[in-house]
Structure formats: structure tokens, C-alpha cells
Amino acid sequence: MKERLGTFNDEADAYAQCEAAGYTAHKFDFPAVENEPHWHDFDSLTFIVAGELTVVDVEEGVTYTCGAGTKLVGQKGFAHCEKSEGYTAIIGFAQDPSTLTQPINKPLPASL
């Protein structure tokens, strides 16, 4: 299993970690969500600023509950689903977000 969780001190630290990794950082307020298993075709760093996000690693069967101060490392192809009552996060993208293919949430192949 790949290391998925880390920490950060505050928003300035989250932005600094994104910059050090060469990632483009953006802050988002997400509404409540409960989505189907999916994957993304890009690497990312998600820093939970407020609220809580539960992420299920579909392949490993591991559940991560991420509150404020948690950094979640998402590698390209990571099959997961998410549940939250709403949260705020700084997301670092490994590539320019304007170049991301749509939809962002790619459906899993039937074999998983």
C-alpha cells in the first residue's frame, strides 16, 4: 500500500508544500458529497483546512478519515470514493488544472 496520509500546520504550510512539490495550489469549499468509486488521471495533494472527508481506497479496502490538518496524497489511477458533509481544502495539482481531462472523476472499469 502506498503512503496516503501526511500532515500540515496551516494554510501557508499547505501552499508551501505544494510549491516545493512543483504543484499548482487552489483552495475550494466542497459541499456535501457521497460519490461512486472513481479515479483521476493526475497526481494531487489534498490539504483538509476545515470539515472532514472520508476516503475509501477501493483496491486496498482501507478507509481514511481526514480532518483539518490532514494531507492526502492522491496518485494518478488511485481508485477511491469520498463521503463528506462538506469541507474546505487546498488541492495541489501536479499539472495545470486547465489541462485536466473531463470528467475529473473517471469511472472504474467493470473488472474492479
Image: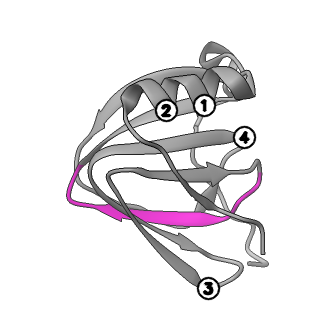
Contact check, label 4 and label 2, Cβ < 8 Å: no
**Residue type beneath disc 3:** Gly
Residue with the most extreme bottom position: 61
Of helix, strand and loop, which one carries label 4? loop
**Residue type beneath disc 4:** Asp
Label 3 sits on residue: 61
Compute the Cα span from label 2 to label 3: 27 Å
The residue located at (61%, 27%) in the rendering is: 18
Label 2 sits on residue: 14
Compute the Cα span from label 1 to label 2: 5 Å
Q: How crowded is mark 1: few (under 14 residues within 10 Å), some or many (20 or more)?
A: some
* Labels 1 and 3: the sequence-earlier one: 1
Compute the Cα span from label 4 to label 3: 20 Å
The residue located at (38%, 29%) in the rendering is: 11
User: Which of labels 4 and 2 is toward the front?
Assistant: 2
Contact check, label 4 and label 3, Cβ < 8 Å: no
Pinpoint residue 90: horizontal percent, then vertical percent: 43, 32
Contact check, label 1 and label 2, Cβ < 8 Å: yes
**Residue type beneath disc 1:** Gln
Q: Residues within 10 Å of mark 3 (few under 14, many from 20)?
A: few
Residue 109: image quadrant is bottom right
Label 1 sits on residue: 17
How many discs mark residues in the rendered view? 4
The residue located at (53%, 22%) in the rendering is: 25
What quarter of the picture does the N terminus occupy? Answer: bottom right
**Residue 43 has which mark?**
4
Of helix, strand and loop, which one carries label 1? helix
The region drawn magenta spans 77-86
- Whether 5 is drawn above or below 8: the answer is below
